[in-house]
Amino acid sequence: MYTRHDELPVLYRRQGQMEAEHYNLVSRALRRLESSIRLRLPGLKTLDLILQADAWIVVDRAFNDVPVVAWTGFKTQERSGLHEPVSCELRYFHGHAAIIRTRVLALMDTLLEERLGDGGDVHNVLSFPGKE
């Protein structure tokens, strides 16, 4: 389990929110695939994303997995439905971390949907037979 985001000094931290579609996708992937997932982020050279139940951390492989940005402290108990965003803490460890944040989330969604394999399936709703 990766813990360096708790051990190294933070450049900047703030409260934020994670959109429900991102949080729900990661939660589902962590339950179905593994308890910790590491994704290589195509187009972002040496950056990887480590997904754990308590934190999502972008790390730089070229610098011994030093954290770049992390989302931690997810407060799921504060939301009343799956469609609502989740409060969290955002930690920046690099001066340019804010620039890649949105791109990381988009890449994460694409990579996890491919791994879960449920993006292209067609689903049908079946009706219950009526009482006659």
Image (spheres, rainbow, N blue to C red):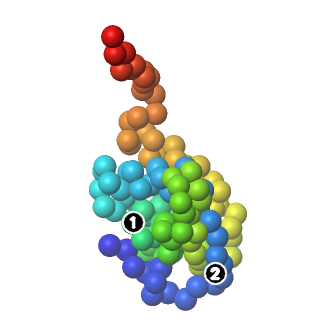
- Residue 70 at what x, y percent from top left? 54, 71
Q: Can residue 41 be seen by looking at this rendering? A: no
Q: Is residue 49 among the parts visible in the rendering?
A: yes
Amino acid, disc 2: Arg
Q: Give the percent coordinates (x, y) of residue 115.
A: 38, 42
- 99 left or right of 31? right
Front-lying residue, 38 or 71: 71
Query: Which residue is at a point 51% across and 71% down the rendered structure image?
Result: 75
Q: Quadrant of residue 100?
A: bottom right
Q: Name the residue under label 2.
A: 13
- Which of the pair 58/82 is nearer the observer? 82
Circle 1 SS class = strand
Report the residue that reaches farthest toward the front: 132
Q: What residue type is labelled 1?
A: Gln
Please, is residue 120 above or below residue 26 in the view? above
Q: Residue 84 placed where, x, y %?
A: 59, 56
In the image, residue 101 above or below residue 5: above
Quadrant showing the C terminus: top left
Mark 1 lies on residue: 52
Where 41 falls versus 6 (above or below)?
above
